[in-house]
Amino acid sequence: MPKTQEPDRPALPVARGTADAAPADASHLHRTVLRRMRFVMAAICSVALCALMAALYLLGLMPGAVAASGAALILGSVLAFALVFRWRLNLRATDPSLTVPMTMVAVLCVLYVMAGSDIARDTFVSFFGLVLLFGVFRYTTRTLLQHAGLMLLGYGVVIFLHWHGRPAGDGLLVDAARWLTLATVLPLFTIVGGQIMAGRRAAMQRLRDSEERFRRLTALSSDWYWEQDSMLRFTTLSPGLEAKAGIGPARLIGRTLPQVAQAPPRTSWEAYAEASAAHLPFVNLECQSNDDSGTLRWLSLSGEPLFDPDGMFLGYYGTGRDITEHKQAEERIHFQAHHDALTGLPNRLLLLDRLEHAIAQADRDGHALWVVFVDLDRFKRINDSLGHKSGDLLLQGVAQRMQSHLRPSDTIARLGGDEFVLVLSDWPAGSLSLGLMQQMLDAVRAPFAAGGNAITISCSAGIAVYPGDAGTAELLVERADVAMYRAKEAGRNNAHFYKAEMNALAMRRLRLESELRSALEAREFVLHYQPQMDLATGRIVGVEALLRWQQARPGLTQPVDFIGIAEETGLIVPLGDWVLETACAQAVAWQRSGSSRLRMAVNLSARQFAQKGLVATISAALQRSGLEPSLLEIEITESLMMADVEQAVTTLAALKGLGVHVSVDDFGTGYSSLAYLKRFPVDVLKIDRSFIRDIVSDASDAAIVAAIISLAHSLGLTVVAEGVERPEQLIYLASCGCDTVQGYMVSPPMQADALDQLLRTVPAALPARIGAGQRRA
Ligand SMILES: Nc1nc2c(ncn2[C@@H]2O[C@H](COP(=O)(O)O[C@H]3[C@@H](O)[C@H](n4cnc5c(=O)[nH]c(N)nc54)O[C@@H]3COP(=O)(O)O)[C@@H](O)[C@H]2O)c(=O)[nH]1
């Protein structure tokens, strides 16, 4: 592992203890260092030369004046160059290192000294060589040859001067021989030196290229480079760390990883400590560290151990990466996978996970926990009538209200649609109660402002208690769901505890649901028909089609036992279509067999009524059967119409447009407003049998029935009284002017054949039965 940088090498794109300069600054720094180095080397040579001259003078080999003036010349030129460097004048030259001028000045100085001396030429020749030698580290072959040529020329000048100063001396011949030797050797020497230089420059260039590639790669890559010493302290960090993760190297240099970062939540440094103690490589080690602005960032490091040739551990080197965004995306995905997008509440997956933890905690602490299944009452109707946006706002509001009644340790989850599950754990013993649940339900029931509407919605809740009701998370939720159904059946807007027998009921429901699905295909449904008698004439004027489920076992099932589930599961739609088709076909069949023209009343459920293609379906049934529209009567309950008045008015108007009759079923039992009644395009009011039952004994019922009949007549509607079982009821109804009656007194619902039989005998039979009844009364 490199500890220091070579002085003449371009700086690596790494920081050593301080923040790095930009790459351009690094290369500028590199050149400045080179220039200084050269100047210092030239100055050392010059000082060495002065020292040598002083020694020659002391040994008596050089005249004092020559030595002094030579030394002054050399030191003066070094000083001049120093000033040139100091004021950066060299930067204006094409060769800012000034190697060539310095060499030239050095040669001139030597020539000057030689000109004033007559001994020790070899020494001076050596100086030429020395000067050239330094040049080897800088010059090309060509420049070396030029300088060698200049030197030889200078030497030639010296010989010439000596020739004239001291002619005919032996020394001149020796000088000439030396000159010739130099003239032969120097070119060779310079060529070799130039080659060495060229090789060295090429090697340097390759190194620079490689480092430049490394620098570019690290600049492009999202990774950064790092090195650690044998004590696992950071020694080297590439600029990427600061640029990409906002962490200045000063914070890391000299420190170990655990000193500057922390292990991710719920983990430790154990694995890293083991790998680094064993000098093993590690990959994608994740940790967290604050950046310089204090923001917590995620880092991922991979490292390789570094050993010297003797196998001695030197430290680690490796790469690092800022994975904060990746981690944040991962967290977002994790959140989305575990939470409901609309409310931000935990979803089923997270609920079950939390519930399992709560169960484990309850086991440890020995306390109970509640799982509460909450379902909004009639949410679908609100969603369909006010739109999904209002429905969404409502769900968010409900979630907030429930949450405000919980403790921070509780969980509230949304399973989808209008279903929520609460996990109440860690409540003080005895503090959980049904009253508390009711308080929460009441809070939910306060009006909401959603999309400009004030909406009121209630909810039903089922409670399963751990450990009494179930031992696993799944089963607890299931049982709370069963209890919630019980709460719905018991009239909604209340909370019920799970009881073991509910499970049997729920199982029955499940079985029923799957049996219902196959019953349609197996043609197990039949229609029974109940006659409606005109009170004035005693004639059968219509029938109501009533659905029955005929199975081999248990036999005939009444609609009250399966219509609700068919409605919940949506099966009522195909089932209702079948009823419509069959009833219309039967009415036409009776007409064709010679029976009178009976009006056929068919019940519509809420789901059917909300179907977009309802009018088209009825029209198609009429066309296929050939039934006259006025002979079809659609029965819609009063509460169904009041659920969404505007929608009901539109649909009823469309039905009226077809020419069919519309009757209001169970009239008097709902929240109907008389003001609304005149807006509905209906033909018939069917008084609910709960008013008829005590009509003779209860003065209020009698008054209500009389008022309904009078009101209906004043609105131009006809009245059918349901559930007429006794003659005295019939007599009272007749006295109030009721138009039509339906009930066991006239006939119970019966199969088509039986009714056909009855119709053939009725003109005589019915008035006789009624007459007998009247007599009994
Ligand atoms: N959406 C659909 N709903 C349907 C269909 N077929 C029936 N129903 C609805 O089921 C409810 C129960 O119907 P059912 O058990 O057939 O009871 C009807 C009569 O048997 C009963 N009735 C008639 N006369 C008397 C009587 O004198 N006493 C007495 N205790 N009961 C009597 O009343 C039911 C008819 O009521 P209504 O529909 O309100 O006129 C019932 O609500 C049906 O609407 C179907 O095809 N689709």
Image (spheres, rainbow, N blue to C red):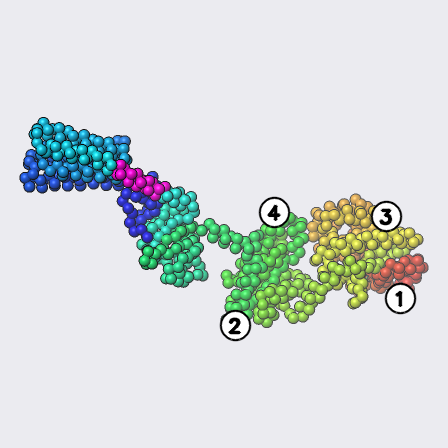
- Neighbour tally class for label 4: few under 14, some 14-19, many 20 plus, Cα within 10 Å: few
Label 3 sits on a secondary structure element that is loop
The mark nearer the N terminus, 4 or 3, is 4
Q: Position of residue 310 (x, y in %)?
A: 32, 58
Viewer-closest of 181 and 196 = 181
- Quarter for ligand 1? bottom right
Marks 4 and 3 sit apart, C-alpha to C-alpha, by 46 Å
Is residue 208 rendered magenta in the image? yes
The mark nearer the N terminus, 3 or 2, is 2
* Residue type, mark 4 in image: Gly
Position of residue 583 in the picture relative to residue 394 (left or right)? right
**Looking at the image, residue 223 lies above or below residue 495:** above
The mark nearer the N terminus, 1 or 3, is 3
* Residue type, mark 3 in image: Gly
Task: Tell me the quarter of the picture where residue 73 sits.
Answer: top left
Task: Tell me the quarter of the picture where residue 57 sits.
Answer: top left
The mark nearer the N terminus, 2 or 4, is 2
* Residue type, mark 2 in image: Gly
The mark nearer the N terminus, 2 or 1, is 2
* Residue type, mark 1 in image: Arg
Q: What residue is disc 4 on?
A: 452
Position of residue 628 in the picture relative to residue 479 (left or right)? right
Q: Looking at the image, is mark 4 or mark 1 nearer the viewer?
A: 4
Viewer-closest of 678 and 35 = 35
